[in-house]
Amino acid sequence: MLNKEQRLQALIDLSDLVSGMDNFEIFENARHRNGFFIQPFCEIALQSILDWKRHDILSQWAAQVAEIQPSAPKKIGVILAGNIPFVGWHDLISIFISGNVAFYKPSSNDEVLIDWLLECLFKVSPDARSYFQKTEQMKGIDSIIATGSTSTATHFHYYFRQIPRLIRGSKSSLGFIFGFENQAELEPLMDDIMQYFGLGCRNVRKILVPEDYDFSIFFQALEKYRFLTDHHKFQNNAIYHKSIFYMNGDSFLDNDILMLRETDSIYAPISVVNYEVYSSLDHAREIITRHESDLQCLVSHQGQLSGSLPFGTAQKPAIDQYADGVNTLDFLLSLN
């Protein structure tokens, strides 16, 4: 068994190892498995993990974790989502740093990357291998952490009703535009929207805009992602949804990179972003409150809207910014 300081050091050593590696081949393998895992997005996702590597950041995060006796570790089942690269890594290292054992079932979409990063961890800390067990069936576990759609979350709650569980369903994110932002100030918002093709819960899938908003500035800022028009899976989705809109007589805005559709829904399919017009800040707050149960995060220019993150940071969560606002370490500590 490793003590907490050794587990912290293992994560730091892992980051040092991976930072110095040429990861082109593993990212290519991931892309062949999942066409949406293109190299630029794999690199962004990996860098967000590496940003946590400083000892002071990890120590502060893990400060609430007491040492677990060798006979006391729990078997924590983890069902990982595979919508964006490395999406389940935070759950795995939360279990590791807590001293428990992760019985993990990776998504086939993300299996290549998760298994590779774990093997890198075992390379710098062979004893860490005992904290992870890959499995297809969740049997004999003490608790479960699972992430999926709203419908699968309902299934998980029922299936694992006899044990403590942390279940996450569908979430989405909002972008708030004041209306004064220029192209350069909007470009970080495009990262929140377009990174990972918009498939993550922290991706902005809906924007709030003032009355008479000039969308030409928005589309100019979006040009930095025109390279995605060469991605056939992304383009196939765009063609499909554009056809549906035409058949239904739905109005939308389009610049051949992204379609904007006016609707009150916070959820949008790939290649589409919803928008809603607000008449005042109070009205905008009403809209945000209406989406509260489905909201993962809210972004605005420099985080100027109360309760929001700055544009460009939605996909760069700090290690203590937990999915759905539920502290994973608190959940794990409650099991002792």
Image (cartoon, grey):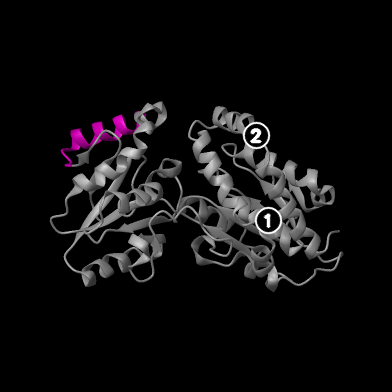
The amino acid on which the numbered mark 2 sits, given as a three-letter code, is Asp
Q: Is residue 104 left or right of residue 263?
A: right
Q: Which residues are magenta?
A: 236-251
Circle 1 SS class: helix
Residue at the spot x=34%, y=63% of the render?
A: 291
Image location of residue 48, percent across then percent down = 56, 51
Residue 22 numbered mark, or none:
2
Residue at the spot x=40%, y=47% of the render?
A: 191
Is 45 included in the stretch rendered in magenta? no
Most frequent secondary structure within the magenta stretch: helix
Residue at the spot x=35%, y=51% of the render?
A: 189
Residue 206 numbered mark, or none:
none
Task: Examine the rendering and report whether any part of residue 55 can be seen.
Answer: yes
Closer-to-camera residue (41/108): 41
Rate crowding at label 1 as few (under 14), some (14 to 19) or many (20 or more) other CA atoms within 10 Å. some
Closer-to-camera residue (327/181): 181
Q: Is residue 5 left or right of residue 32?
A: right
